[in-house]
């Protein structure tokens, strides 16, 4: 006897709505992680700390975290 599995539930969230983070330095030299839709972000002492934050916030999706070549500003 087998137990029927529930049908897959279609997610109303598109890939464009999932959080993505850009990491870089601001004008003061602090490391910044900014969610691309402006919903979250933070200032960090090290790049490693910024990456850790972004990786956790994106549910460990490596394609969702990018390092910026240019300056990144956190807008509050």
Image (spheres, rainbow, N blue to C red):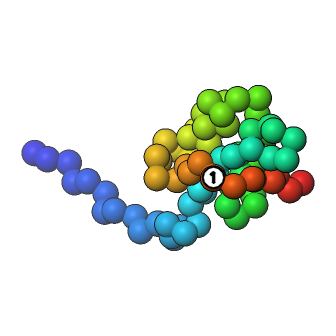
Give how far across and how far down residue 42 sits, in percent: 78, 42
Horizontal side of residue 11 vs 8, given as left or right: right
The residue shown at (61%, 37%) is 51
The image shows residue 12, relative to residue 75, as above or below, that is: below
Give how far across and how far down residue 2 sits, in percent: 14, 47
Q: Which residue bears the numbered disc 1?
A: 68
Task: Give the farthest residue toward the left.
Answer: 1
Mark 1: secondary structure: loop
The residue shown at (66%, 34%) is 47
Horizontal side of residue 18 vs 39, given as left or right: left
Horizontal side of residue 4 vs 29, given as left or right: left
The image shows residue 63, relative to residue 56, as above or below, that is: below
The residue shown at (80%, 37%) is 30
The image shows residue 37, relative to residue 25, as above or below, that is: below
For the C terminus, give its image quadrant.
bottom right
The image shows residue 59, relative to residue 48, as above or below, that is: below
């Amino acid at each position: 006897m087998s137990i029927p599995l529930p049908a897959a539930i279609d997610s109303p969230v598109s890939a464009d709505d999932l959080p993505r983070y850009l990491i870089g330095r601001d004008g003061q030299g602090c490391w910044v992680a900014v969610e691309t839709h402006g919903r979250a972000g933070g200032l960090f002492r090290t790049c490693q700390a910024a990456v850790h934050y972004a990786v956790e916030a994106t549910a460990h999706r490596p394609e969702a975290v990018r390092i910026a070549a240019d300056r990144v500003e956190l807008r509050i």
